[in-house]
Amino acid sequence: MALVFALLLAGPPAAHAASRDAGPCAGQAAARHGHIAAVLDRRAGARRTRGQLGDARADRRRSRWHARLARYYGEQALLRPVPRGTAITYRTLRRSRALRRSFLTGFEQLTPENEMKMERLQPAPGVFRFAEADRMVRFARRYCKRVRGHTLVYGRQLPRWATDGRFGPEQLGFEMEWHVRTVMSRYAGRVAEWDVVNEAIGPDGSYARNVWFDALGKRYVERAFRAAHDADPSARLFYNDNGIELPDHPHTVAVRAMVARLRRRGVPIHGVGIQNHVSTAHHASEAQLARTIRGFTSMGLNVAITEMDVKLDPPGTRARRLERQRLVYRAAARACARNPRCSSFSTWGVGDGVSWLGPMAGGLLFDRGYRRKPAYSAVSRSLGSPAAP
Ligand code: 9MR
């Protein structure tokens, strides 16, 4: 307990502080935190001198206070080295009280699953619809949860006007930058981290064909990042991709080469999101994922695990498959937690009933009835537990 308290007071090591900030209520909570700690320190000091309270008891007392304060502000991130995140859709957030409860108690970060994609935010040229995204951001901030913005430039989930050929390459480039600027300016100061470009590279390592690449070539990636940084210079800007868990896979190698080139060119990119959609039969080991993460962090980038799910593959009883799933999740959480530049760990949905893979895939941390599965505590423990209440 004394050790936990000492660590809390000392705060995270410098590298962690750079990549793992404490979230939307950090200032407020930290001020209160500091004040209470000082009062308790004085009291404990006085008591100690009078010989009424031993060090261990004083520490236990202060630890309890810290935990209560953190709960009071919903600011688990202050105590938790790596925040846990999840994707949520607006529809389920509104409809399901069980989902809200699991989210509020089980996660520190929210990613709107579809509500910040271009087809939703800009259904007609110049016509922006922010209502649902706004409500999700407000909801998250009310409970001191961070928001990961997802995603500004993506080859899918595009409005018809962007793909029907009515705009030539030059106009499309302008529209892309205008979209990035408009969305980022709206959420500046409220959404600290964005997937600026999503899935620009294909499984064979070449650039994915999409409307942006076809119109602008590979330079569209750089243009998107520069526009994003202009609109909100304080935001952390990520490139996010699927299928890049294995360090030597052609896809991963190509993404590494792309972000290295962007860095050399002085493009403002701060991190890489590893989606990590895997299954109990096909997944990276802890050592492999750790090597992939290092491949990016050694360039000075942060990494986030952004969309993890672990589909339950046959064979075996449900219990056996859940155990295999627990180990896959634990390996990924450990690989992230052991690298100080791995800044968050997200699943793509709260519970199996709302997964994009359908209710039978069973890939998330909560089951269809929002009960915690074995993988839940493995992830939480691996990411670093908050002080016990
Ligand atoms: O979960 C999203 C699902 O509801 C959408 O129908 C789908 C459309 O492509 O996109 C899903 O989210 C994707 C994410 O935006 C990017 N990485 C892959 C995710 C799963 O397909």
Image (tube, rainbow, N blue to C red):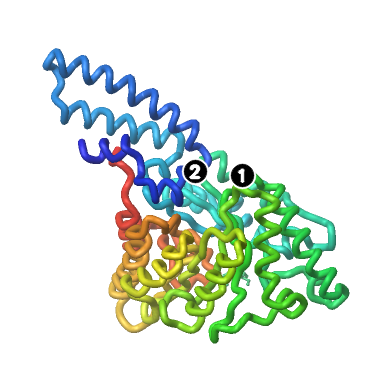
Instruction: Write the residue at 78% across / 68% down.
Output: 173
Give the image quarter of residue 42.
Answer: top left
**Could you say which disc has been placed on residue 190 in the image?**
1
Amino acid type, callout 1? Arg
Relative vertical location of residue 130 with respect to residue 361 in this rendering, above or below: above
Report if residue 70 is visible in the image. Answer: yes
Where ligand 1 lies, by image quadrant? bottom right
The residue indicated by pointer 2 is: 23
Mark 1 touches mark 2? (CB < 8 Å)? no
Looking at the image, which is closer to me, 156 or 300? 300
Q: Amino acid at mark 2?
A: Gly
In what element is the residue under mark 1?
Answer: loop
Q: Around disc 2, counting alpha carbons within 10 Å, would you say few (fewer than 14), some (14 to 19), or many (20 or more)? A: many
Q: Earlier in the sequence, mark 1 or mark 2?
A: 2
Q: Residue at x 50, y 68 (%)?
A: 275
| Position of residue 87 measured from the top left corner of the image (x, y, whole percent) | 54, 59
Does any atom of ligand 1 lie closer than 8 Å to the CB of label 2?
no
Secondary structure state at the residue bearing disc 2: loop
